[in-house]
Amino acid sequence: MRIKLLKIKLQCFKGLKSFEAEFFGRNAKIRAENGVGKTTVLDAYLWLFSGKDSTGRTDFEVRPLDDFNEVIKGLVVAVEASIEVSGVEHILRKEQHENVVKGQLRGYSVICTIDEVPKKVGEYQDWIANVIPETIFKMLSDLSQFNTKMHWTDRRRELLEIAGKIPMPAGFDGLLELLKGRTIDEYSKVLGEQRKAHKKERDGINPRIDELQRGLKDYAQAASDSEVELIAKRENAQEDVVKLDTYIQVLRDSEKTRQEGFEKINDLNEKLLHRENCVRNQQGPIEELNDERAKLEQDHTDRTRELVILRHVIHSDSSAIDSVKNAIAASLLTLAGIKAEYQKAKNKPADETCFNCGQRLPADQIADAENKRQTALGNIEARSNQTQKAIEEHKDELNKQQEAFGEHIAKSNALVEELTIDKAAKDKRLAEIAEQVKNRPKANYADDEEWQELTAEIEKIKAELGEPVSQQLDKNQADRDAKAEQIAEINKALAQYDNIKGSKERIAELESREKELAQLIAEVESKLEEIGRFKVEQSKMVEAAVNGKFEHVTWKLFKYNLNGSVEDTCEALLNGVPYPDISAGQQLYCAIDCINTLSNHYRVEVPLFVDHSESLTLPLESESQTICLEATKGLKELKVELQSEPKLQEVAEIRNGEHILW
């Protein structure tokens, strides 16, 4: 997929009041002295696509500043670009507007359009991400992204993906069988964690054995009663707990009857609330007023929704009118070309001499040539008539669209006026309804016979329930908890006898485990050494595969330590010199080589702005559309120079002619 920049326009962006340049998808230079605005054009292009500037910031100041470095108010910042995506032209536009409330600036809002169709910011970003994901766009459009801004681990991951599948080194079949679907690094991490876990477990065994041996002495000193005496005490306490549980259950069963009474009181209270509501409604029902209020609100909402729909129709009418106008303009240009073709063919008589010998042709051949010429003129005239007919049809369609547009505008204005009148009437009636609800008379429940009966029945049930039995439950529960605590203490004492037996068995298990762990650690370290040898062989193959994808840059992807281990790294080299140590021009040279490789890998080309290109004396080998930003002393205005391509220059002149005509 190729993305080309055809045209870019700036309005009040940073230090540029206005700027417009047509590139027609070709390589170009933008020249001027420092501070005129070359980098500003790059910032505008990146802001349009990603919302960031050339340094990767999203919070940079896009609005012009005055002589006191204050933001100039009342301006609309806009950037528009015509791009070609795989042969299809699109127009992207992003504007930043001031949000002014009661004369005060409250912030800024962003308005986006794609092909003149308004888009929400999220929809705009999704469209661009669908064309090219942001991560790929940054790598292909920012010369410092891949080698400077990107973390080396992410850069290394990209390089390995570019290299493709690397075969396994020979002679490690046994090791590869142990992977079981894992990568060598994953298996190395597994072994490392195993060794770490084994050593940690081994180092913790001796302290645990010492602790268990100290515990044996403590258990022997703490034991007072014999094991048989403790068991007898526990049985007596358990019998007491059973008796207390039985009595507590009896008390709780009696409490169930009280609970039923409380539930009946709750039911009566609900009936009482319902009755009070009925009494209030008898003093002045408000259901009809609420219904009227809801209807007024709904009617106004429906009319407002009708206006919104009508405005959408007006917008569609406007788009249709623009489309017909564009069709008429295109047909007029086509007609002009046909007329020029007709005039050229008409002014050129049929050939009467032989183009080889120069002698006059026979009369029949001259007549035949004239017939062919007349036929060609007739065909051109037919095309002209057909194009003229299409123009007339488009004009008829334009008249119909404009008539419908006018009708919808008139209907919208009438509906706005009706809504204004209806809203005033609605607000007045809502105020009257609110006043009626507020002035309703208060209800007197004591005069209602049903309310009095419900109140009396509630008081009667309360009197029958009497005092609660919670105090008795609390006392017996406290006795029961004390017995349970006594049982827990006895169990704790009995557990000491079990702990002595368990500690001796555990000490024997730990001593056996310590020997087993020593053997496991030795086996893991042997496997890790084999992995180290494997990674040395594999690293050489990986570096060869990656470097084969680049024209000039070579990559150091592994660091070989003195102990034989291999560590991952990612360092770009040019002629053996690390990227941070080469000149600025060489860094640009390396960056373009990287972008070419990434473009081929992702099969995507995007326009590339090369800032400070005057520092580059090496050949510019970019495979994408390239726009060089070149500092030129004494040049006070931005000058755009397209790469010399005669045929494309003719196209540019034709396009400019069409623009002036339109």
Image: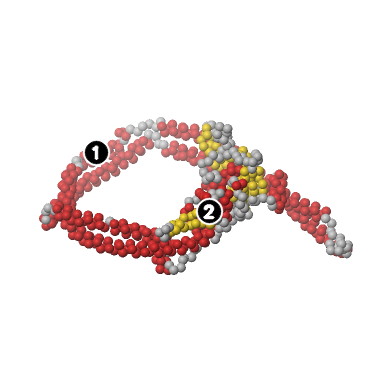
Relative side of 541 to 400, left or right: left
463 and 658: which is toward the camera:
658
Q: Nearer the viewer, mark 2 or mark 1?
A: 2
The amino acid sitting under disc 1 is: Glu
Q: Earlier in the sequence, mark 2 or mark 1?
A: 1
For the residue labelled by badge 1, is the local secondary structure a helix, a strand or a loop? Answer: helix
Q: Position of residue 315 (x, y in %)?
A: 60, 44
Please tell me which residue is depicted at 69% across the width and 52% down the height of the picture: 645
Q: Which residue is mark 2?
A: 577
Locate the N terminus and report the quarter of the image it occupies: bottom right
Please tell me which residue is depicted at 28% across the width and 39% down the height of the picture: 454
Relative side of 566 to 220, left or right: right
Relative side of 254 to 343, left or right: left
* Quarter occupied by residue 594: bottom right
Marking on residue 368: none
Cα–Cα span, label 2 and label 1:
98 Å
Q: Which residue is mark 1?
A: 459
Q: Position of residue 224 (x, y in %)?
A: 12, 53
* Quarter occupied by residue 409: top right
